[in-house]
Each structure stands twice: as C-alpha cells, then as structure tokens.
Amino acid sequence: MALVFDAAVLSRKSDIPEQFVWPAEEAPTVGGVEEIAVPVVDLAEFKAGGGAGDGLRNLAAACERHGFFQVVNHGVDPKLLAEAYRCCDAFYARPIDEKRRAQRRPGENYGYAGSFVGRFNSRLPWKETMSFNCSAAPENGRMVVDYFVAVLGEEYRHMGEAYQKYCDEMTRLALDVTDVLATCLGLRRGALRGFFEGDNSVMRLNNYPPCPQPHLTLGTGPHHDPTSLTLLHQDEVGGLQVFTGGAWRAVRPRSDAFVVNIGDTFAALTNGRHVSCLHRAVVNGRAARRSLTFFLNPQLDRPVVPPPELLAVDGRPRAYSDFTWREFLEFTQKQYRSDASTLDAFVAWMRRAVAVEGAMEDGQNKNQVISKN
C-alpha cells in the first residue's frame, strides 16, 4: 500500500513510518540547541532615511556570514497576517482528499504536497505544504485568486482573495528589503529592484503536525533555498534553526517580525558577497507548527548576472557563470533534491552540460569535414 502523509492519521500513531526517520547525524539534537542572536532591521527607520552606522555594518556582516536576519516595522497589517494564518488553519483542517484536489505534480513547484511522498523514498520531511505562484506583473493581478478557484473550487475564493492581498504585501516588503541589501553592498537604493521586475515568486503555507517521535525526524531537512529571498513568518511554536559558527542555532519566534533568508540565486546575484542561509526545521511532539513563506524570484528567463556597479565596487572575478532562474528551478525540481550543496551541484551540472554540448559540436564539425573530403 502506497504511503500517504495524512496528518490526522499519522500524528495519532505511536511510531512514525521508517521513510520519515533521518540518519542519526542529521537528526535534531535532543534537548534543543542554543538560540541565535538575530540581527534586526527597522524598515521604517531605514525608509525614513536611516541606513548608516553600526546597525547596517552588523547587518552586512551577517549577510556575509550566514545570510539571515529579521525585519520589524515592516508595514504589514497584523489583521492581514492573522487572516493568512486563519486561512492556513482552515485549509489544513480539510480532509486529505479535498486538499489533494490541488495535488502538486512531478516537476512543478506549486500545489499541495503531503511531505515528499511520491518523489523521494527516505529522509522525508514531517510536513505538508500548499504552494502557489504569484507575481507583481500587472497582467497577473488576480493569479492567486484564479488558481484557488480553478483547482479547489468557488468555495475557496475568499481564501484566494486573502492570499492575493498577502502576496502583494510580501512582494512590496521583499523589494523594500532589496533596498536594504543594496545599501549593505555599497550600491544605491533601488539598484536591485529591476532584477525582480515581472517576478515569478512563490507563496507556501507550511503545516508541521504534532509528531509522536520528533527526535527521529525533521520538518525540513538542512538546505539552502534555491530562490532569491525568503520572507518567513513563524507562529509561536517555533522550530526554525540556522547553521552558523559550526552549529545549529534556534530562531526564537517573534510575532512582529519577518525572518529573511538569503537564497542561492541572490547569493549568485551578489557575486557571492552575500551567502545563502543554511537552515532546517524541527518538529514538536505536542503542538502543530505553522509558517507562512514567501519566495521572491525573478522572471523565469532573466539571466542571473551581478550588477556592473557591484562588480566594479567588489573588484573580484565572477564567482558564477550566467544562468536563468528557469534553469536553476528545473534543476531543483527534476534533477536534484535541495540540500546544503544545491548551488554547487547546479554549477557542476551546468559545466558538464556545456562540456557535452561542446564535444557534440566538435564531433559534428569533424563529420562535416570528412563528408566534404
């Protein structure tokens, strides 16, 4: 019988299926870990003309060390955030068959997924997710609403409306954050916004059900997000951990803050100046944990190339060859399971592909010469 991640059933069992058991060296630390001292950006102060001094220098250092910080005074309405959580709870309270009407299909990065069942057979994460695309492009102003209605039915229109508003706010906030990061890089404010024009972003609702054996599994395994920037809001249960200084550190939930993770694509955009955040999520034996995650991405076919002014300021050679978000996305969806080495694996994969293409061209040229003779 095929494995199905039905939270209502599995959470009541005494043992978890073996597919969810992680190797001892990757399993969570019994007794927990120390908390990380999180750099905090006051966005309202920055937009009002702040952005100099020790605070910005400390943020720049954090971006170059572990790629993680928090944003407060961000302008997101608490009522909108509360409604996003209410809709999240309502969706995950539905029967498994109803949620699976939006089943994520192989090779796609949107839809409902009960763990990675069907895609992988081991080290499965103890979670279920609902992901959907969103974009600030004018022609996509209703794409979230249309998606919810199309795959789940008219009764989900309100949920689609709520997440349409939430995604619009996340896009606004994410672009504001790029201004902060541009300043950290020694660039003018707004220097990075154009890269995300016509974005192909993703919103994800995460549900980590109570787990009968939380010490054996993970909600999300260690990985770098392949995306550009991640804006995450976690509930009061907590569970997010960041790897820095050779150890895992817990991130204390803060209701008035959004967590920002730098992803692989943004690291490449900054020529490696800012590093992609290595993180994971642990689960709880008593309470479900929820988080709302927004992934800012460029257009699918936009080349990921550092701004010329950054290369001039940096003075270092290019750290990565050109690639597009479409190429990287397809690699993570069809070729590779995202982990702590995703970008390096992608670079190696591209080099092999170029070498094979070059060898084929050489062979064709030789055949043409022979045929002429």
Image (cartoon, rainbow, N blue to C red):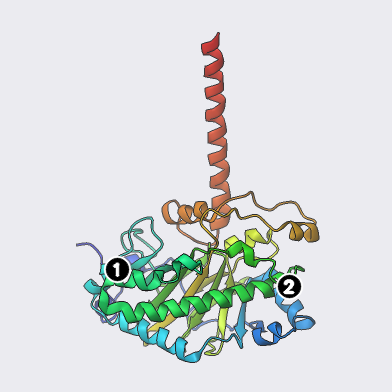
In the depicted view, which residue is nearer to us: 122 or 154?
154
Label 1: state its secondary structure. Answer: helix
Q: What residue type is labelled 2?
A: Thr
- Asked whether residue 249 appears in the rendered view, the answer is no
Residue bearing mark 2: 183
Image height of 145 relative to 368, above or below: below
Classify mark 1: residues with Cα within 10 Å, few (<14), some (14-19) or many (20+): few
Image height of 53 relative to 198, above or below: below
Q: Position of residue 18 (x, y in %)?
A: 32, 67
Label 2: state its secondary structure. Answer: helix
Residue bearing mark 1: 150
Q: Which amino acid does label 1 sit on?
A: Ala
Real-space Cα distance between discs 2 and 1? Answer: 41 Å
In the depicted view, which residue is nearer to us: 28 or 223?
223
Q: Position of residue 1 (x, y in %)?
A: 19, 62
Residue positioned 67% across, 73% down in the render: 179
In the depicted view, which residue is nearer to us: 116 or 248?
116
Residue positioned 55% across, 30% down in the render: 359
